[in-house]
Image: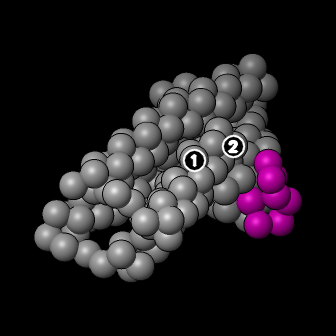
Amino acid sequence: MVNPGQFALLFIVLAVMVFGLLSLLTVVLPGLTIIWVAALVYGLITGFNLTSGILFGIITLLMLGGSIIDNIIMGASTHQAGASWYSIAGALVAGLVGSVAWPPFGGLVAALLVVFVIEIIRLRNWRRALQSARGMLAGCGWSVIARLGIGVLMILLFLLWVYL
Protein backbone atom coordinates (compact mmCIF):
# COMPACT_ATOMS: atom_id res chain seq x y z
CA MET A 1 0.00 0.00 0.00
CA VAL A 2 1.33 3.42 -0.99
CA ASN A 3 1.12 6.13 1.64
CA PRO A 4 -0.61 9.44 0.74
CA GLY A 5 2.67 11.39 0.71
CA GLN A 6 4.29 9.04 -1.78
CA PHE A 7 1.17 9.08 -3.93
CA ALA A 8 1.06 12.89 -3.90
CA LEU A 9 4.76 13.08 -4.84
CA LEU A 10 4.30 10.59 -7.67
CA PHE A 11 1.21 12.47 -8.92
CA ILE A 12 3.05 15.82 -8.91
CA VAL A 13 6.13 14.37 -10.63
CA LEU A 14 4.02 12.71 -13.33
CA ALA A 15 2.00 15.91 -13.84
CA VAL A 16 5.24 17.85 -14.35
CA MET A 17 6.47 15.16 -16.76
CA VAL A 18 3.26 15.31 -18.79
CA PHE A 19 3.59 19.10 -18.88
CA GLY A 20 7.15 18.66 -20.16
CA LEU A 21 5.96 16.20 -22.77
CA LEU A 22 3.25 18.57 -23.99
CA SER A 23 5.72 21.45 -24.10
CA LEU A 24 7.67 19.47 -26.70
CA LEU A 25 4.94 20.34 -29.19
CA THR A 26 6.23 23.91 -29.16
CA VAL A 27 9.73 25.32 -29.29
CA VAL A 28 9.07 27.39 -26.19
CA LEU A 29 10.13 25.22 -23.26
CA PRO A 30 12.82 22.54 -22.96
CA GLY A 31 10.42 19.65 -22.36
CA LEU A 32 13.06 16.92 -22.12
CA THR A 33 14.85 18.92 -19.45
CA ILE A 34 11.58 19.40 -17.56
CA ILE A 35 10.98 15.63 -17.59
CA TRP A 36 14.57 15.02 -16.46
CA VAL A 37 14.35 17.55 -13.60
CA ALA A 38 11.11 15.93 -12.39
CA ALA A 39 12.84 12.53 -12.30
CA LEU A 40 15.84 14.05 -10.51
CA VAL A 41 13.64 15.65 -7.85
CA TYR A 42 11.83 12.34 -7.32
CA GLY A 43 15.15 10.55 -6.94
CA LEU A 44 16.51 13.13 -4.52
CA ILE A 45 13.39 12.92 -2.37
CA THR A 46 12.95 9.14 -2.41
CA GLY A 47 16.62 8.20 -2.68
CA PHE A 48 18.53 6.33 -5.35
CA ASN A 49 19.46 2.68 -5.36
CA LEU A 50 21.36 0.74 -8.01
CA THR A 51 18.32 0.14 -10.23
CA SER A 52 16.96 3.67 -9.98
CA GLY A 53 20.46 5.08 -10.51
CA ILE A 54 20.90 3.09 -13.71
CA LEU A 55 17.45 4.08 -14.98
CA PHE A 56 18.10 7.73 -14.09
CA GLY A 57 21.42 7.51 -15.95
CA ILE A 58 19.59 6.26 -19.05
CA ILE A 59 17.00 9.02 -18.65
CA THR A 60 19.87 11.54 -18.44
CA LEU A 61 21.50 10.19 -21.62
CA LEU A 62 18.15 10.36 -23.43
CA MET A 63 17.66 13.97 -22.33
CA LEU A 64 21.13 14.97 -23.53
CA GLY A 65 20.81 13.06 -26.79
CA GLY A 66 17.34 14.43 -27.43
CA SER A 67 18.57 17.97 -26.92
CA ILE A 68 21.37 17.46 -29.43
CA ILE A 69 19.43 15.46 -32.01
CA ASP A 70 16.97 18.33 -32.34
CA ASN A 71 19.64 20.56 -33.90
CA ILE A 72 21.10 17.72 -35.96
CA ILE A 73 17.76 16.86 -37.56
CA MET A 74 16.95 20.49 -38.34
CA GLY A 75 20.43 21.19 -39.73
CA ALA A 76 20.51 18.02 -41.83
CA SER A 77 17.05 18.68 -43.26
CA THR A 78 17.99 22.27 -44.09
CA HIS A 79 21.27 21.19 -45.71
CA GLN A 80 19.49 18.46 -47.66
CA ALA A 81 17.12 21.11 -49.01
CA GLY A 82 20.14 22.95 -50.42
CA ALA A 83 21.17 25.40 -47.70
CA SER A 84 24.83 26.09 -46.99
CA TRP A 85 26.40 25.33 -43.65
CA TYR A 86 26.91 29.09 -43.21
CA SER A 87 23.20 29.74 -43.30
CA ILE A 88 22.58 26.82 -40.94
CA ALA A 89 25.13 28.20 -38.46
CA GLY A 90 23.56 31.65 -38.80
CA ALA A 91 20.14 30.15 -38.21
CA LEU A 92 21.38 28.42 -35.06
CA VAL A 93 22.67 31.71 -33.65
CA ALA A 94 19.52 33.56 -34.72
CA GLY A 95 17.39 30.83 -33.15
CA LEU A 96 19.16 31.16 -29.82
CA VAL A 97 18.96 34.96 -29.82
CA GLY A 98 15.36 34.96 -31.06
CA SER A 99 14.29 32.49 -28.39
CA VAL A 100 15.56 34.80 -25.68
CA ALA A 101 14.53 38.11 -27.28
CA TRP A 102 11.10 37.18 -28.66
CA PRO A 103 9.58 34.17 -26.95
CA PRO A 104 7.71 31.99 -27.58
CA PHE A 105 8.28 31.59 -31.33
CA GLY A 106 10.94 34.24 -32.00
CA GLY A 107 13.71 31.67 -32.26
CA LEU A 108 12.01 29.68 -34.98
CA VAL A 109 10.98 32.77 -36.93
CA ALA A 110 14.47 34.29 -36.64
CA ALA A 111 16.14 31.05 -37.75
CA LEU A 112 13.87 30.72 -40.77
CA LEU A 113 14.43 34.36 -41.77
CA VAL A 114 18.20 34.05 -41.46
CA VAL A 115 18.29 30.92 -43.63
CA PHE A 116 16.09 32.62 -46.21
CA VAL A 117 18.10 35.87 -46.29
CA ILE A 118 21.54 34.21 -46.37
CA GLU A 119 20.42 31.84 -49.11
CA ILE A 120 18.95 34.71 -51.18
CA ILE A 121 22.27 36.53 -50.89
CA ARG A 122 24.24 33.37 -51.67
CA LEU A 123 22.11 32.01 -54.50
CA ARG A 124 20.38 35.14 -55.80
CA ASN A 125 17.29 32.99 -56.24
CA TRP A 126 14.39 33.46 -53.83
CA ARG A 127 12.71 30.18 -54.83
CA ARG A 128 15.75 28.12 -53.89
CA ALA A 129 16.14 30.18 -50.71
CA LEU A 130 12.52 29.46 -49.86
CA GLN A 131 13.17 25.76 -50.48
CA SER A 132 15.99 25.88 -47.91
CA ALA A 133 13.69 27.57 -45.37
CA ARG A 134 11.05 24.91 -46.01
CA GLY A 135 13.71 22.27 -45.39
CA MET A 136 14.39 23.83 -42.00
CA LEU A 137 10.67 23.89 -41.21
CA ALA A 138 10.37 20.21 -42.17
CA GLY A 139 13.36 19.42 -39.95
CA CYS A 140 11.65 21.24 -37.12
CA GLY A 141 8.60 19.00 -37.55
CA TRP A 142 10.72 15.84 -37.57
CA SER A 143 12.62 17.00 -34.52
CA VAL A 144 9.34 17.50 -32.63
CA ILE A 145 8.39 13.91 -33.45
CA ALA A 146 11.81 12.63 -32.34
CA ARG A 147 11.70 14.62 -29.08
CA LEU A 148 8.17 13.38 -28.35
CA GLY A 149 9.32 9.78 -28.79
CA ILE A 150 12.31 10.36 -26.52
CA GLY A 151 10.09 12.09 -23.94
CA VAL A 152 7.64 9.17 -23.88
CA LEU A 153 10.55 6.75 -23.48
CA MET A 154 11.92 8.83 -20.57
CA ILE A 155 8.54 8.74 -18.81
CA LEU A 156 8.19 4.99 -19.40
CA LEU A 157 11.63 4.42 -17.88
CA PHE A 158 10.61 6.56 -14.90
CA LEU A 159 7.45 4.45 -14.45
CA LEU A 160 9.61 1.32 -14.57
CA TRP A 161 11.82 2.90 -11.89
CA VAL A 162 8.78 3.56 -9.67
CA TYR A 163 7.42 0.05 -10.27
CA LEU A 164 10.71 -1.64 -9.40
Residue 137 drawn above or below residue 109: above
- Outermost residue on the left side: it is 50
**Placement of the N terminus among the 4 image quadrants:** bottom left
Q: What amino acid is labelled 2 in the image?
A: Thr
- Outermost residue on the front side: it is 1
At 43% across and 40% down in the image, what residue appears? Answer: 152
Q: CA distance from mark 1 to mark 2?
A: 14 Å
Q: Nearer the viewer, residue 98 or 30?
A: 30
- Label 2, on which residue? 26
Q: Helix, strand, or loop for circle 2? A: loop
Residue 9 drawn above or below residue 48: above
Q: Quadrant of residue 43?
A: bottom left
- Outermost residue on the right side: it is 102
**Placement of the C terminus among the 4 image quadrants:** bottom left
At 74% across and 59% down in the image, what residue appears? Answer: 99
**Can residue 124 be seen at all in this image of the molecule?**
yes
**Can residue 72 be seen at all in this image of the molecule?**
no
**Residue 52 located within the stretch drawn in magenta:** no
* Disc 1 + disc 2, Cβ < 8 Å: no
- Label 1, on which residue? 18
User: Which tag is nearer the camera, tag 1 or tag 2?
Assistant: 1
Q: Quadrant of residue 139?
A: top right
Label 1 neighbour load within 10 Å: few <14, some 14-19, many 20+ = some
Magenta stretch bounds? 99-106
At 59% across and 30% down in the image, what residue appears? Answer: 141
Residue 156 drawn above or below residue 128: below
Residue 33 drawn above or below residue 120: below
**Residue 103 located within the stretch drawn in magenta:** yes
Q: Position of residue 155 (x, y in %)?
A: 41, 48
At 50% across and 38% down in the image, what residue appears? Answer: 148
Q: Earlier in the sequence, mark 1 or mark 2?
A: 1
